């Protein structure tokens, strides 16, 4: 094909640096999370998934599955249109009400994914607010970065999780700027958590709006799963909270919550909200069921915390270096793309452990890692097996240990 050489040249470069991506071919089996089938070399093998963002296994919760199946039987598959042209189903409105309540806000707006919600909301805010300046944490997710870029608003990057740097940068802006501070709560690759209170206080001091991505926190933090801002009692001081239905809630879709005027503004002007087919009603119903469950059930969160602590303690006991952070994410730094891929392959081939290598551009080059996300359904035996496997590999591959 005439253009394939152009494509292949760039793919070859990726392969040469070890950053080419190979997808694991999986089949999840309902009721057996985190177990899955891995299709490999024409055969099928059982694996335990250690890198799922279905953090609490809610994607296989019987009530959630039943809600999706029942709604599909009752209403069919697709929504049948954009939200404006016949696509708004009662399930969307119920879901938005549930989300607004979860975050203690007046209103919410659902998108087809968390990526789209960030992209659409930030690009609309940045493009339409007078003299908008978006102050973006240096480690913000690609969806926020793309939204900010698309808005063409002035962008100021502040030092990751550093309210003092944010303070300086806010102070340097002209008086007529509409300031928007965009950041995350749990950063998913390092597992660190933003000092939300300090950031909100700095933003308030300068009259800035706050935009908080709680994608890796909703469902898991706070007494009702409202995220870190709920846990810290700060939800009412954050202007806009954004989240996903695809991670701890186990379904699919994204959302923003905020004042009625804010949500109406995004609803009315965001291209990424207006010109796309609404989520299937069955997906919305499943998400609502999952949110409702996690608003009252502490079981999944408590068990997740227990297994996260257990894995950390076992890694420490074996001297396997991992990043210490206050979240549910356990990054094991390998710092080399080829070695990370090799470890991941060995774990899968020899031990039935699936953990995807995390490489550039998801993380900076030289910080390649394995990222483990223990959940309530990983057993103590799963953890022992994982730690035993890592111990063997660390020895074989001569990777530095913490105590060595
Ligand atoms: C995954 C992710 C998103 C996107 O959410 P999806 O629902 O998967 O599109 C947004 N922000 C952050 C920080 C994420 O990690």
Image (cartoon, rainbow, N blue to C red):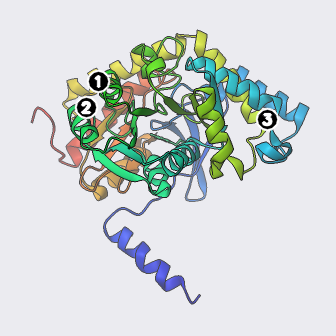
Q: Which residue is drawn at the image coordinates 19% and 46% (left, top)?
A: 399
Q: Is mark 1 within 8 Å of ligand 1?
A: no
Which SS class for mark 2? Answer: helix
| Mark number, residue 281 | 3
Q: Residue furthest right?
A: 74
Q: Is residue 213 above or below residue 302?
A: below
Residue count near mark 1 (Cα–Cα under 10 Å), binned few <14, some 14–19, many ≥20: some
Q: Which residue is mark 2?
A: 163
Residue count near mark 3 (Cα–Cα under 10 Å), binned few <14, some 14–19, many ≥20: many
On screen, residue 17 versus residue 27, left or right, reads left
- Determine contact: label 2, label 1, CB under 8 Å: yes
On screen, residue 289 versus residue 325, left or right, reads right
| Res 234 visible | yes
Which SS class for mark 3? Answer: helix
Residue 237: name its quadrant: top left
Cα separation, mark 3 vs mark 1, equals 39 Å
| Mark number, residue 198 | 1
């Amino acid at each position: 094909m005439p253009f394939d050489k152009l494509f292949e040249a760039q793919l070859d470069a990726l392969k040469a640096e070890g950053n080419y991506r190979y997808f694991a071919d999986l089949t999840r089996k309902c009721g057996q999370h985190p177990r899955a089938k891995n299709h490999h070399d024409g055969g099928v093998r059982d694996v335990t998934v250690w890198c799922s963002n279905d953090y609490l296994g809610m994607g296989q919760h019987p009530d959630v599955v039943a809600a999706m199946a029942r709604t599909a039987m009752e209403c069919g598959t697709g929504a049948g249109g954009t939200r404006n042209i016949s696509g708004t189903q009662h399930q969307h409105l119920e879901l938005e009400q549930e989300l607004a309540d979860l975050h203690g806000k007046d209103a919410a707006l659902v998108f087809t994914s968390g990526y789209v919600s960030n992209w659409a909301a930030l690009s609309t805010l940045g493009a339409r607010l007078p003299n908008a300046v978006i102050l973006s944490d240096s480690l913000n997710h690609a969806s926020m970065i793309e939204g900010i870029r698309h808005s063409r608003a002035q962008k100021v990057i502040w030092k990751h999780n550093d309210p003092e740097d944010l303070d300086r940068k806010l102070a340097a802006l002209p008086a007529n700027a509409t300031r928007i501070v965009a950041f995350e709560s749990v950063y998913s690759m390092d597992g660190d958590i933003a000092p939300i209170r300090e950031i909100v206080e700095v933003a308030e001091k300068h009259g800035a709006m706050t935009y908080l991505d709680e994608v890796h926190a909703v469902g898991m933090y706070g007494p009702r799963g409202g995220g870190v801002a709920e846990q810290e009692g700060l939800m009412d001081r954050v202007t806009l909270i954004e989240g996903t239905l695809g991670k701890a809630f186990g379904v699919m879709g994204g959302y923003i919550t905020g004042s009625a005027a804010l949500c109406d503004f995004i609803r009315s002007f965001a291209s990424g909200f207006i010109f796309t087919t609404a989520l299937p009603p069955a997906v919305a119903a499943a998400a609502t069921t999952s949110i409702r469950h996690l608003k009252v059930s502490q079981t999944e969160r408590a068990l997740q915390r227990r297994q996260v602590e257990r894995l950390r303690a076992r890694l420490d006991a074996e001297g396997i270096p991992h990043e210490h952070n206050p979240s549910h994410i356990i990054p094991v730094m390998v710092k080399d793309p080829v070695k990370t891929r090799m470890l991941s392959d060995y774990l899968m081939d020899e031990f039935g452990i699936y953990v995807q290598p995390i490489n550039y551009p998801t993380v900076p080059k030289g910080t390649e890692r394995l990222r483990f996300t223990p959940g309530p359904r990983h057993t103590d035996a799963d953890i022992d097996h994982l730690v035993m496997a890592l111990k063997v590999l660390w020895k074989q591959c001569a990777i530095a240990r913490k105590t060595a």
